[in-house]
Amino acid sequence: MHIKNVDLNLLVVFDTVLAEGGITAASRKLNLSQPAVSHALARLRAVFGDALFERQGRSIVPTPFARSIAGPVRSALGTIERTLGAAGSFDPATSERTFRVGLRDMLERTMLPPLLKDVSGLAPRVDIVSARLDRRRLEQDLVAGELDLAIDVLLPLSSRVRHERILVDRLVVVARRGHPALRRLRGRTWNLPAYLAQEHIQVSARRSGPGLEDMALRPLSQSRRVRLRCQSHGAACEVAAQTDLVATIPESCAIDAVSSDAVRILPLALEGLVLETYLYWIEKADRDPANAWLRERLKRAAAAAGRLS
């Protein structure tokens, strides 16, 4: 099959149907009629000799062949889009671009509200997809165009991936107001022995392994009892509010998650322990004005969510 026999617009339709999960949603996204989208898919089926999508109840799902070409097609379209963007300019007021940002669950609650508030006012037709981030595939996803940007802790990636620190957040402890340990303090300072005497909640997307606070305790020949390991700072705060377990989480998440007077925020008693968050993008996106624009928006969102370095 030669590329001259394929209308690239058909691939845009294919990618949009795949991303939106249906012809109706894709037609709205592309500002095309549903028959036009269906006709484009019919032409692609003739080119590839495959059904591409099959009906499953009220939904349509991609065929194995469609899934196998989805990544290369999206990567190719992303390369073309970045090339065209680099050759011209980016006008957020009129752009209809969709940005895919790799973002861990724990940052969605603090980063997305200020980001969307900012973007909605400047770029009413720009869409944001917060995509699940897999650290093992992060560089591959950025290179392939599966992600435009990503936000995570410092990672060992190659020089193809640019990074910039955008957030420095100190760690704090969350405990319920009626916690027995707080009553026993009687005006004394919350300190490391009091912290270590508690049962703890560790928040991590990983199934096992130490947290920052555990690694900071090792040189002191100290350890803590982790009774619960969970994935969400919000869930950790809820558990801390209803039990005698305490949670160690970033201050910005604690302030955001604490919506009542059921819990107290206490200092960690480990001086200088902070969580650093980095923004990642692929080297060739340096010349993409659209990518640069969103990077600035994400840095503003980080500043609103916490403290910049």
Image (cartoon, helix red, strand yellow):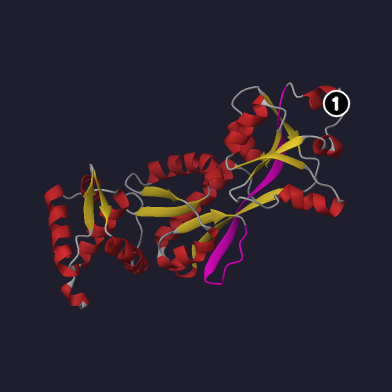
Counting the numbered discs, the total is 1
**Residue 306 shows up from this direction:** yes
Q: Position of residue 103 (x, y in %)?
A: 50, 50
**Secondary structure mostly taken by the magenta-highlighted segment of the chain:** strand
Q: Decide: is 247 above or below 307.
A: above
The amino acid sitting under disc 1 is: Leu
In the image, 51: left or right of 83? left
The residue closer to the viewer here, 81 or 309, is: 81
Q: Residue at x 37, y 67 (%)?
A: 86
Element type at mark 1? helix
Q: Residue at x 39, y 45 (%)?
A: 122
- Asked whether residue 33 is in view, the answer is no
- Where residue 159 appears, x then y in whole percent? 56, 72
Q: Which residues are magenta?
A: 154-177
Q: Tell me which residue sits at (17%, 53%) in the image.
A: 37
In this image, 12 relative to 104: left or right?
left
Q: Is residue 129 above or below residue 67?
A: above
**Camera-side residue of 115 and 70:** 70
Q: Residues within 10 Å of mark 1 (few under 14, many from 20)?
A: few
Could you say which is closer to the camera, residue 129 or residue 208? 208
Q: Is residue 261 magenta?
A: no
Q: Taking 248 as reference, is 180 left or right?
A: right
Q: Nearer the viewer, residue 59 or 135?
A: 59
Residue beneath the point at 22% across and 67% down:
8
Q: Image quadrant for the N terminus?
A: bottom left
Residue 6 location (% of width, % of height): 18, 71
The residue tagged 1 is 185
